Image (cartoon, rainbow, N blue to C red):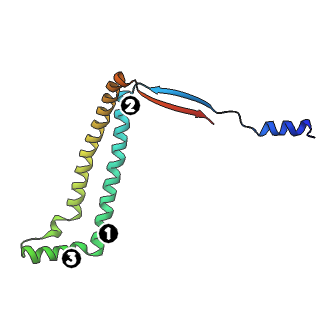
Amino acid sequence: MSSVAEKLARKSNRRPPAKQVRLRLVYIDFWSAVKLSFLVAVCFAVISIVVTFLIHTVLNSTGIFEQVNSLVQDVAGSSGDLTSVLSLGNVMGFAVVAALLNLVVTTALGAILAVLYNLSVKITGGLLVGFTNN
């Protein structure tokens, strides 16, 4: 036989059923999408500049540039000097310009995707997203 206390203990171990809510995403604010895509692009720009610096430093310290430069001079003659082209200043300058172009393009793509999603919602009705309360 089970007592009342055992029955109450079994009841207290049960979790209440999770409440599920289904929401439909029908609008993305244009300026919020632009700000978010700009911040993501800034993060990618910083990461690409740091990675470029690290890769250049590692390749320069291991002597890869000197080996490639000697190979280029053997093939092209003494007129080709690769170390002046692949100096740290030139490489980092190119990385900064590429990062700035990537920043502009990523921000513009975020804005364009927000506009396209807002236009497509009129046809499809939006995304159905489900949430639970655990």
Label 2 crowd bin: few (<14), some (14–19), many (20+), radius 10 Å: few
Looking at marks 1 and 2 on the same chain, the residue that comes earlier in the sequence is marked by 2
* Residue labelled with disc 2: 32
Q: Which amino acid does label 1 sit on?
A: Val
Tell me if 132 is positioned left or right of 129 in this view. Answer: right
Tell me if 80 is positioned left or right of 25 in this view. Answer: left
Residue at image location 33% in from the left, 59% down from the top: 51
**Tag 3's secondary structure?**
helix
Q: What residue type is labelled 2?
A: Ser
Q: Is residue 6 above or below residue 68?
A: above
- Cα distance, mark 3 to mark 1? 14 Å
* Residue labelled with disc 3: 67
Residue situated furthest front in the rendering: 1
- Cα distance, mark 2 to mark 3? 49 Å
Tag shown at residue 89 = none
Residue at image location 21% in from the left, 75% down from the top: 66
Quadrant including the C terminus: top right
Give 59 or 2, whichever is nearer the viewer.
Answer: 2
Q: In this view, does 59 lie above or below 123?
A: below
Looking at marks 3 and 1 on the same chain, the residue that comes earlier in the sequence is marked by 1
Quadrant including the N terminus: top right
Tag shown at residue 58 = 1
**Tag 1's secondary structure?**
helix
- Cα distance, mark 1 to mark 2? 39 Å
